[in-house]
Structure formats: structure tokens, C-alpha cells
Image (cartoon, rainbow, N blue to C red):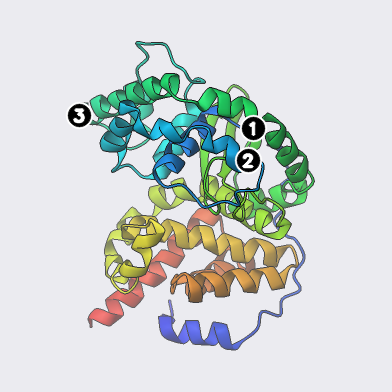
Amino acid sequence: MKTIHLLTAIMLFFATACTSNRQVQNAGKTDATAKIHFNKNVEFFGYVIQLAEPEAHDPNHPITPILAQGANDINIPALQKIYETGGHLPYDTFVKLFYTLPELPLPENYTISSEVLKSYGMTTEEELETMNALLGYANQFYQSSQFEKIWAALEPHRQSTLELLEDNLPSTALLRQLEGFYQQGFTGYEVVPSLTIWSGPGWGFQTLEREGKVANFVLGPLEPDFNYTDGARFENLAIHEFGHSFVNHVVLGTVGEQITQTEALFEPVREAMAPQGYQNWETCVIEHFVRAGEVLIPELMGNTTASQVALTRHAESRSFIYLPFIVDQLRAYRVKQDLPYEQAVRRTMDDLREIVMERKE
């Protein structure tokens, strides 16, 4: 296989505009539609975080005084225990945990099973004890806080948010393109907005429901002051977060050896990745492949402008410097050669490994 030097590939990519007018191809045949709903437990998670790190909102916005009703909740001892016990855990663990739990408040003796914790990568007795202690503190805080009153007061604002976003939900055509490109499918797609989570973030994960596997996409407001009006950004975030349900298990299950062998590539980006929440090369690799989907999915649907904007933003502004190379390789393997997605990922990582080996010589 001919090796493409990384820097050369990057320069060539940015020097040449993407001129492909390729129509949607390899599209799936799903009849699934995206559904949208709020989740009370997720709103509680957002409330717990905003008490410690409140986002500045317009004091005249009608939601601002509703959240302010709970200002004294910061002094509840159980809240401090939550921060002390779970402060080391990433937010995605909290989001998925609260989303999949029964609705709070929980029965007094409720515990998390070891099987559930294994799905979060937690296998030791100490981790089990820590998570159950954390859940106990969360339950105590829930019952002592003003959250129930806040949740009730936010009802009309939840309704207006749902009405706004329902007009911009990911289309069936987009879901089919996701399934076709990644060669996987889900029985359902759930969008879960929030009015308590700070503006900007999103999380994607799978859950197993009675009807089958479901891809879930949790997001905070797109802009400050609970603003969800940017339809283009909403679609882009949907491609990204639903992408995690397609990508994570493929990368982790397919190219673990190549991730280890290319670890040296993390050093040039380590400092830029840490503030974004990516503390190791494994999570950085996953993010590169998810963001490659943000570039290639719009391109396959004929939106080359959105594709180029995503590539430039991630590569130049967010320091995902290997993204142009990964996009180029995935385009060659998955789109042009029509290789299975898993094989395209493996070959792309093999190419990165060759670059690392070449540098060592």
C-alpha cells in the first residue's frame, strides 16, 4: 500500500475544494423517525451542574427566575456529597446513567446492578460502592431540593421548545444516510433537549428498549438564554451525537491494537484536547471518526458547504489536525471503494500506523 504522508495529505486537502456532486448513495431503508421528548432525570442532572457552575442568563428571560428559585439548594449537604463523590466522573457517564434510571425519586434501597456498571466500564467492587453511594446522595438531594417545583414551573417552556424543535427534527432521509454510511440501524432515534443543561454540549449513546436498540441524543440549548432556533446547528449536532451510537463500538471493537500503535499522535494535540474533555488518544480517535461523519454525511447528501464548514471548524479551530487525512481515507475506502464501514475504519487506522512507523525510521 502506498503511504500518504500526513502533512502532504492535509495540505492537498485544503488546497483543493471538494467538487463532488455525488448524490446520496449507500442510503439505508429505515422507516424510523426521530422522536423528541424531555427527560426529568436529565433535567435534574443539568440542575445539579448549574448550581455549581451557573451559566449567566438574561435576568429578564422568563426561565431565569424559575431556576433562581433553587439558589439556596447549593447549601444542601447531599449536593456537596454528590460533587465530592462523582467529581471525577465524565459528564457523559452522568447523562447516560440518569437517562436510563427509573424516574427520580428512587426507592430508598435502590441499587445499580453490576451489569449496568459494566456497560460504563466499571468492574471493581470499589466502583460499585462509589456509584451506589453517589446515587444515594442524588436521591437525598432530589427530595430536599426545589427541583420538583422548578420542573413543574418549566412545563410551558418545555412545550414551546418541543414545538420549535419538532419542525427541525432529523429527516428520514438523513437517518437513512446515517444508516447507509455506517451500515447499521436502530429501531428508534430519540432527541432529548434540556432547559437546565448549559448551552452548547451534546451527548450520544445507545440504549436497549423493548422494541430494540435506540440511538439517543441529549443536548443543551444551542445558544445562551435557552435558545434552540439555529436549525443548521441542530442538524449538525444530531449528525455528531447520533454518530457516536454508530461509531464508538466499531472503533473500540475493531482497531484497539492500532490505537495503541498510534499513541504518539496524541502528543501534538494533547494540550488542545484536554479542555474539550478528551483526555486520551482512544477518545480522541473516536472523536475524529465521529467528526469525519459530520463532513462526509452532508457531502453525500449534496451539501458540500456544510461539509467544508465542518471540516474547517474541527481541523483548524478545534485542533483535530488528523481529520482531513481521516476524511480523505474514509472517502476513498467507504465511499469510492464501497468497503464496509468497519473495514474502512481499520484501513484508515492502518494508514495512520504507517505514518507513525515512517516517523520512527
Q: Which of 318 and 358 is in front in this view?
A: 318
* Residue 299 location, quadrant: bottom right
From this viewpoint, is residue 306 visible?
A: yes
Q: Nearer the viewer, residue 148 or 69?
A: 69
Mark 2 vs mark 3: give the one in front: 2
Earlier sequence position, callout 2 versus callout 3: 2
Residue under the image location 43 percent in, 56 percent down: 286
**Relative to 72, 226 lies left or right:** right
Q: Which amino acid does label 2 sit on?
A: Ile
Q: Give residue 63's mark.
A: 2
User: Quick check: 178 above or below 130?
Assistant: below
Q: SS class of the residue under badge 1?
A: loop
Residue type, mark 3 in image: Glu
Cβ atoms under marks 2 and 3 closer than 8 Å? no
Dividing the picture into quadrants, the one containing residue 335 is bottom right
State the residue position of label 1.
154
Instruction: Tell me the kind of residue under disc 1.
Output: Leu
Could you classify mark 3 by the number of other residues whose Cα lies within 10 Å: few (under 14), some (14-19), or many (20 or more)?
A: few
Judged from the image, the secondary structure of the residue bearing numbered disc 3 is helix
Residue at the disc numbered 3: 126
Real-space Cα distance between discs 2 and 3?
40 Å
